[in-house]
Structure formats: C-alpha cells, structure tokens
Amino acid sequence: MKMSCRLRGHKEWNVRASTLARNTYNPIRDVIETLQIKPNPKKSYIPLSVGDPTAFGNLQPSENIIDAICDIAKQNDSRNYAPTIGHREARQAVAEYSAHQGMVSADDVILCSGCSHAIDITLSVIADAGQNVLIPRPGYLIHKTLGEGLGIVIKYYDLLPDQNWQVDLESLESQIDENTAAIVVNNPSNPCGSVYTREHLKDIVDVASRNRVPIIADEIYEHFVFSDHEFTAISSVSKDVPVLTCSGVTKRFLVPGWRLGWVIIHDRQNIFNKEIRSGLMSMATRILGPNTLMQKALPRILKETPQSFYDDTIRFIESQAKLAYQELKKTPGLRPIMPQGSMYMMIEIKTSLFPKFDNELQFISKMCNEQSVLCIPGKCFNYPNYMRIVLTVPEEILREACVRITQFCEDHMLKKLDNDVVSIVQGEPTRAASKKNFQKNIA
Ligand SMILES: *Cc1c(COP(=O)(O)O)cnc(C)c1O
C-alpha cells in the first residue's frame, strides 16, 4: 500500500560527511600512505617514524603506576562517572604537580582524554571559524588538524634551525593581525627537540603581550630535557598574557594509551574573565569526562613516581640523541640538528646532493624500500627537506638504523662531479639550492 502522507524528508538518500569531518585531515597518516613504502624483506624493518615511546618495548613505565592502576581497578569508586572536568582530588594532584608553572589551584585544571583532547577543547574555546591561530613551522601538526577542522585559519611562524630552533620573533610578530586568537608554543618541541631558555620564552611572551594575544602552551614534553638544559613553563614567565597549558601523562610516564591529559588556565590579570573558563567547562561536557580509573590513580602516579624513573628515561634518550647525532653528522648529505630534549631529532637532507630525488618524500620512500628504515618526512611538519627520527628505539636498533641511513646516502649521493655540479655542491650554493626547493615545496 502506498503511503499517502506528504514526504517530510528527502526524495533520495544523500548522506554526507559534515564539513568538520571533511576538513579534518591528519597529514602524517596521509603522507605516509602516499609514500607507498615496501620495506626490503631482506632487512628487518626499523620504523624510526613511530612517535610512541612504548612501541619497541624497551621503555617501561615505572612500577608504581602499574600498581596504582591495579589497586584502583578493584575499588568500586573507580568505575563511576566523575564530574566532566575530573575528580577534584585528581585536579588537585595536577595542580601540585604543576606548581612550577606558577600559582595553580584545582579550579584551574580541567582533565581531558589526553593532551590532544586538551588542545582540541582549548582551540575550540579560544577561536571562532575564520579567526586565526599561529603555530610553529616546523611543528607537530595536531594543532593544524584540530584547528582547520574547526574552520580556524592556521598561520605559521618560523623556527630557526641554526639557532636550535628558536622562534624567529620577527616572523612571529609579522603573522599577528586583528583576527589572531592565539599563539601555540610547543616547548620542548616535537619534532625539533628544542628547549627554550627562560629569556627566549620571555621574548615570545613579550610579542604576545604587545599584541594582546593569548598563548596556548603545548607542554606535553615538560621536564623532558637533557643535561645542561632547564625546562621553564611559559606560563611562569608571563605577567599579563593569559596562557592555557596543555599537558598530560602520555610521554613522560610512558603510557600514551592511558589517555589522560589536562588544560591548566593561567590568567593572572583576569583577562579571560569568566568566559573562557566557563567555555572550557562547557567543552569538557561534550564527552562525559576522561577515564575515571586513571583519574583515581593520578594522585599516586604524579606523587609516587620515583625521580630515578624520570632520570633513567631522559638519560637513555639523551644518550640515544648523542649516538644518532655523532653517527649522522658524518653521513654525507645529511645535517642532524642536536636536540636538547623531547624524543626526536630533525635531520636536514641536502637534497641538492641527491638530484635523483625531487623531494624528501622520494628520498624517504626509496630509503625505506632499500634499507627498511622509515623516517617521517619534513612535509608532515610543514618543513620540506628534513626528516624526523625518534630516539626511543633500543640502542642496537638505532645504531643499525644509522649504518643503513649512511649506506643509503653513500649509494645515492651525487658522485661524479663535473665542474658545474661542484659549484653547486661546495659551500653556500647548496643552501641556496635547498632553500629554493624549500620554497617550491612550501607553496
Ligand atoms: C604526543 C603529542 C601530543 C598528544 O598527546 P596525547 O596525550 O597522546 O593526546 C600533543 N602534542 C605533542 C607535541 C605531542 O608530541
């Protein structure tokens, strides 16, 4: 029997993904897929691409945190819902753990499902579609992925490879306009491994202060710094600029899958008024709070983890950084930049010495197909002609990877130098050539 009532819906099926979904794009996955890599089956595969410190099983979390989770899983009150911003005891523990950032109380802390969720709610509260947010180049593109999904315009300020990736302050200031809603500062940095001094952070804050732009601090690598370097929270050097600091347990405690992060609101001059604070609280209600098992364990995780655990982890990564730097410094055609913290190193590929390859993507896929070593192309960080390696892999594997990377460079570097090429290869013109490539690739 035919329905005779008037059709209220559509005549045809036409189910489409939302603009938000279509605008959400994670470059790492996409770029790696387009590389079409086929690791050489004759050589063990070494993914120096995986930014997960647990991937190789050599770095284990501290026992106390596993004990805390096991104990708490047995308690009845670890299973119920918490307030959407998190249990007060857990927020209080984060406030105490974060005292180095400046005065923090439990009321300034919102618990999230990992640091990326913290960045997500922060960006969505601070900017409307059409406003812009400045992020570093090179930079970890979660900020871009999240921002562009929301219709926020992402603009870039440059980091300076020859100054340990410090912020080019002129570039930063020149990108600010009346639609700028925030500046993202990622310190210590993924992918650069840079750690900024207090003075440099003050300079960044001065730019923000002059232009009345709040800061979003991605400090997921807080305290993850090598000897002779000191971690300073950017909020601790700000007198007026409000700072939303995003962090979590992911990297420092070696538990990325446990998904617990937070946003801390620093607003000494009450510039945010109540609006941003209550906006963050509203955004926190979109999921019904992060995992309560972790929240209940958090005070023990943050307070009882022995200093020796942190020291051992960072000492290991530092020695890996030194190893990779020493080995790759000698490799023809590469220029590693020694990191000062975090878990990564950026390496410049002098592409003019590898004319076979049009860009670093081709270099990287060929290297994987021949040597079974995969690195992340600079393109994923908006920075062509570089690649990023992770330093958390076991020592023997890192050593082997360096040998193979060197072998690959020797196999493919320009060998026979006719007179014209010599002039390109030696000295400055190399940089000019790679700069041109850089601009070509960025466009
Ligand atoms: C790993 C990482 C994150 C994401 O952390 P989660 O807690 O896993 O969401 C955010 N920012 C940077 C710079 C990272 O390297």
Image (cartoon, rainbow, N blue to C red):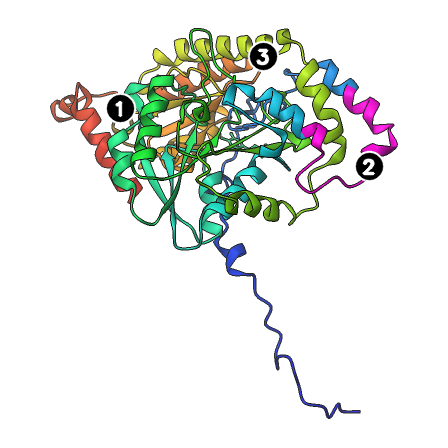
The answer to which of 237 and 339 lies nearer the viewer is 237
Q: Position of residue 313 (x, y in %)?
A: 58, 12
**Quarter location, residue 397:** top right
Residue at 54 percent of width and 55 percent of height: 21
Question: Height in image: 175 above or below 295?
Answer: below
Identify the disc placed on residue 242: none
Is the CB of mark 1 within 8 Å of ligand 1?
A: no
Secondary structure found at label 2: loop
Circle 1 is placed at which residue position? Answer: 414
The answer to which of 254 and 377 lies nearer the viewer is 254
Can see residue 3? yes
Residue at 58 percent of width and 33 percent of height: 108
Quarter containing the N terminus: bottom right
**Quarter location, residue 88:** top right
Choose mark 3 or mark 2, whichever is in front. 2
Circle 3 is placed at which residue position? Answer: 313
Of the numbered discs 1 and 2, the one sitting upstream in the chain is: 2
Q: CA distance from mark 1 to mark 3?
A: 39 Å
Say which amino acid is labelled 3: Thr
Q: Position of residue 186 (x, y in %)?
A: 44, 29
Q: Position of residue 159 (x, y in %)?
A: 32, 28
Quarter containing the C terminus: top left
Span colored in magenta: 68-90
Question: Height in image: 125 above or below 184?
Answer: below
Say which amino acid is labelled 1: Leu
Of the numbered discs 3 and 2, the one sitting upstream in the chain is: 2
Is the CB of mark 3 within 8 Å of ligand 1?
A: no
Circle 2 is placed at which residue position? Answer: 79
Instruction: Classify 10 Å Cα crowding around label 2: few (below 14), some (14-19), many (20 and above).
Output: some
Instruction: Classify 10 Å Cα crowding around label 3: few (below 14), some (14-19), many (20 and above).
Output: some
